[in-house]
Image (spheres, rainbow, N blue to C red):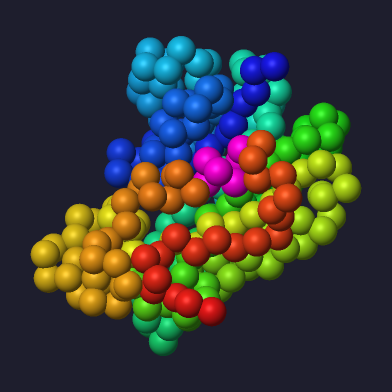
Amino acid sequence: MSLTAVVTGAASPRGIGRATALVLAEQGWNIGILDIESGRALAQEITEKHNVKAHAVVADVANESQVRAAIDDLEAALPPIAALANLAGVSSPVPYLELTSEEWHRVININLNGVHYVTRRVAESMVRHHYGRIVSVSSTSAQRGGGTYSKTPYSVAKAGVIGLTRALARELGPYGITVNAIAPGPIDTDIMGGPLTPDRRQSMINDLLVDRVGTPHDVASAIAYLLSAQSTYITGQTLNVDGGLYMH
């Protein structure tokens, strides 16, 4: 049966979300795109290149009512949702002592509450089908207390994603649903504060065990594996895709 993977945050032209949507489409998934910006161009590209269905909806993941309406829309337009990649997120390089309450809530609402809102609505459908794969993007910042680009609220939100992943793995496992997280290290995307200068790129490489900064495709490939049928026995885990930046 043809199934659908929902990808949040896929509209950014240099993001992990776009790369993930394209990798999943290449593997035969129908793609639901949920982003605060229009993903229609990506949906059209996917349909034309990969001979699968794709549908894009505009919604703010930090707004629960918008999320629920968006998933309703995707379910009406596409085959059953069997996979979810929570990739929508924002960075925040503001030092803690300069942090406003507005910035704190903005980052937490998008990076943590948004994951909860989308997951909760999609999980309701997965439970009915007794099958599902959920992957959310955390960060090595959650494990290291920052250190790449973003600072405290980002690290806190991404640590919350790991906690949410473990709790949901316990609760949803009996329904045939696996829940995992990915923790990227330095990845060349706009969330790192724009394109990397040669000096900044080299500074990041100096902290790694491989001689390059990661690409969106590196992360997308790991997400695709955790959303696949081959990952049945993996749940509650956080997979670091970080070039060796953080080793337990």
- Name the residue at 37% across, 66% down: 243
Magenta-drawn stretch contains 7: no
Q: Is residue 13 visible?
A: yes
In this rendering, the answer to whether 68 lies above or below 29 is: below
In terms of secondary structure, what is the magenta stretch mainly? helix
Residue 177, position in %: x, y?
77, 44
Horizontal and vertical percent position of residue 130: 84, 34
Please state if 177 lies on the left or on the right of 216 as rendered.
right
User: Residue at the location (40% across, 65% down)?
Assistant: 242
Q: Quadrant of the N terminus?
A: top right
**How many numbered discs sit on the rendered protein?**
0
**What is the quadrant of residue 64 in the picture?**
top right
Quarter-of-image position of residue 146? bottom left
Q: Position of residue 225 (x, y in %)?
A: 55, 43
* 226 magenta-colored: yes
- Residue stretch in magenta: 223-228
Q: Is residue 113 left or right of residue 198?
A: right
Residue 101 versus residue 167 in the image, above or below: below
Q: Is residue 39 above or below residue 92?
A: above
Q: Is residue 103 left or right of residue 172?
A: left
Left-right relation of 81 to 12: right
Residue 82 or 112: which is nearer the viewer?
A: 82
Residue 47, image x and y in percent? 43, 15
Instruction: For the C terminus, give its image quadrant.
Output: bottom right
Q: Residue at x 53, y 22 (%)?
A: 28
